[in-house]
Image: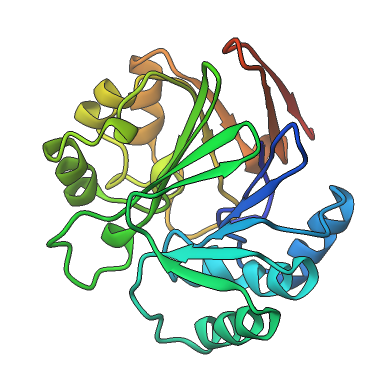
Amino acid sequence: MRFLDVGQGDAVLVRSPEGKTMLVDGGRSTTRMKELLQTYGVSKVDLMVATHADSDHITGLITAAQEANPTLFVNNGLAGTTKTWERLVAALRADGTTFQKASNQIVNLGSVRVHVLAPPAGMGDDQNDNSVGVRLEFGRFGALMTGDSETPETRAWLAEDRPEARGPVQVYKSIHHGAANGDNQAWLDAVKPETVTISVGPNNYGHPTRAALDLYAKNGVKVYRTDEQGTVTFTGSADGSYKVTTEK
């Protein structure tokens, strides 16, 4: 699985041993996504997930829809209100892609099992707190990513006692690019990550925050950052072991 260097945004590419492909979010640039699809030889996406409809997560998905003919598209069910969202929907419909609202379903990508973690009830219309979670398992290797979830959503997932929201996992994506309102101690206690990757680029938000970095350090979690190391790739094995390579 690759945490793609898309600047200030999220995009995670997963390829199973059988060659099945999942793309979770797509960053904010169609041009950059086209480059990345070519670099990594992606001509088909079997599962596309938009964790939520913010532009730094879905803009690059437009290119992926046009270039890689997704079979299944999963999102939080909240209609976006931007032209970017409209362009994404139009591109997916032109491909004949199947649309599904996240509903705690399981999608098998060959030997990789993908658990879709639906947003909890009662989150209102806030896109961040309706982020879709994605937990993947390949034998004893596990990873978790939850878009831009904030404390109300992660607290609700723990209250629901969703097993997909509990670790340990070897690979974890920092919530909301390392924002102060993302990861917290109760959530990390549940997830128990070995590593965390912060998908971030130049920004005016202060991401990643010192509070987030201190939290990871306190918990002994190894940190990777796409702004410093470029695309971060984890090659997982069914026995739970993995290798990490970085672009820089």
Q: Position of residue 151 (x, y in %)?
A: 21, 46
Above or below, 76 against 196 in this view is below
Q: Position of residue 229 (x, y in %)?
A: 70, 34
- The residue under the point 49% across, 72% down is 99
Q: Position of residue 140 (x, y in %)?
A: 52, 16
Residue 45 horizontal side relative to residue 144, left or right: right
Q: Nearer the viewer, residue 12 or 207?
A: 12
Above or below, 131 against 190 in this view is below
Q: The N terminus lies in which quarter of the figure?
A: top right
- The residue under the point 70% across, 58% down is 45
| Number of numbered callouts drawn | 0
- The residue under the point 45% across, 35% down is 144
Above or below, 244 against 125 in this view is above
- The residue under the point 42% across, 57% down is 205
Residue 223 horizontal side relative to residue 69, left or right: left
Q: The C terminus lies in which quarter of the figure?
A: top right
In this picture the colour scheme is: rainbow
Displayed quadrant of residue 60: bottom right
Q: Position of residue 47 (x, y in %)?
A: 60, 56
Displayed quadrant of residue 7: bottom right
Residue 186 horizontal side relative to residue 83, left or right: left
